[in-house]
Image: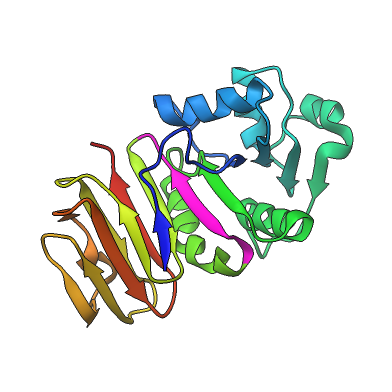
Amino acid sequence: MKHYPRYSLETLAKRIVLANGAFPQAPLPLALIDRWVAGAEGYSLTCCDGGVNKLRQYTERLPDAVVGDLDSTAPELRQLLADRTHHSPDQETNDLTKTMRYLHASYGPSAITLLGASGGREDHLLANLVLLPTYAPLVDELVMLTDEGYFLLITEPSLVEVEPGQQLSVFDFYRQPLTFRGVRWPLEAHTLPELSSGSLNCATAPEVYLEAERPLLLYVANL
């Protein structure tokens, strides 16, 4: 069984991916980026294509890598980045998928904090959410941190630390029996009829339990 602590600056993964959505504004994701900017030990930051343009408006430090078809990266940045760019022209996958595959090929499955995957165009957000479960073979842990909360990729029976009263939603893209305990409306090996059916739940305990055969997304809203 996997255990997930309440997320904080100290518990979030140090391998950061910055997508090309809205640049973070909330204190926690910005503090994570600030640690990378300061050169804190173990931190790295990889941009999905145009995410580097937004990063450049926040800091002069260049990302460790930029991955994608590079159609959104500013030309002057492409010159500065030189061999830090990893061009993948394939139009059958998006830049986030290309980035996840690049990181897996370079470092193997690792824990990743994904930033900048929400905001901006809503079609990009929906595509990113649908794709998150498909990254299960590529990562050891994946948290998509937003300004309002976070999405956690659940790939095995898991206990997740929360606060009683915290708002939660579970999204099952595979319509499978799932178990969800420690919430106002628990489930026991129940198949949700619609993708939206697991939304707008609420924690009743300091830990919630999730189990299913295939990957799930758990959304935890900020208090």
Q: Position of residue 198 (x, y in %)?
A: 23, 65
Compared to 141, does 26 lie above or below? Answer: above
Q: Nearer the viewer, residue 34 or 7?
A: 7
Viewer-proximal residue, 208 or 28?
208
Residue 41 position within the rendered picture, expressed as x and y whole percent measured from the top left? 68, 31
Please, is residue 11 above or below residue 29 in the view?
Answer: below
At 60% from the left edge and 60% from the top edge, which residue is drawn? 139
Question: Residue 107, percent across and down?
Answer: 74, 55
Report the number of numbered marks.
0
State the extent of the magenta-drawn residues as a range.
Answer: 138-147
The image quadrant that residue 39 belongs to is top right
Q: Is residue 116 magenta?
A: no
Residue 43 shown left or right of residue 178 in the figure: right
Side (left or right) of 12 relative to 45: left
Q: Nearer the viewer, residue 147 or 139?
A: 139
| Image point (46%, 69%), residue name | 155
The color scheme shown is: rainbow
Name the residue: 22% across, 81% down. Answer: 190
Which residue, as the protein is rendered here, is positioned at the far left?
184
For the residue pair 125 and 10, the one nearer the viewer reads as 10
Residue found 22% across the figure and 59% down from its top? 199
Please tell me whether residue 34 is drawn above or below residue 138 in the rendered image.
above
Q: Quadrant of the N terminus?
A: bottom left
Query: Which quadrant does the C terminus fall into?
Result: top left
Q: Is residue 27 rendered to the left or right of residue 45?
A: left
Image location of residue 30, percent across then percent down: 49, 26
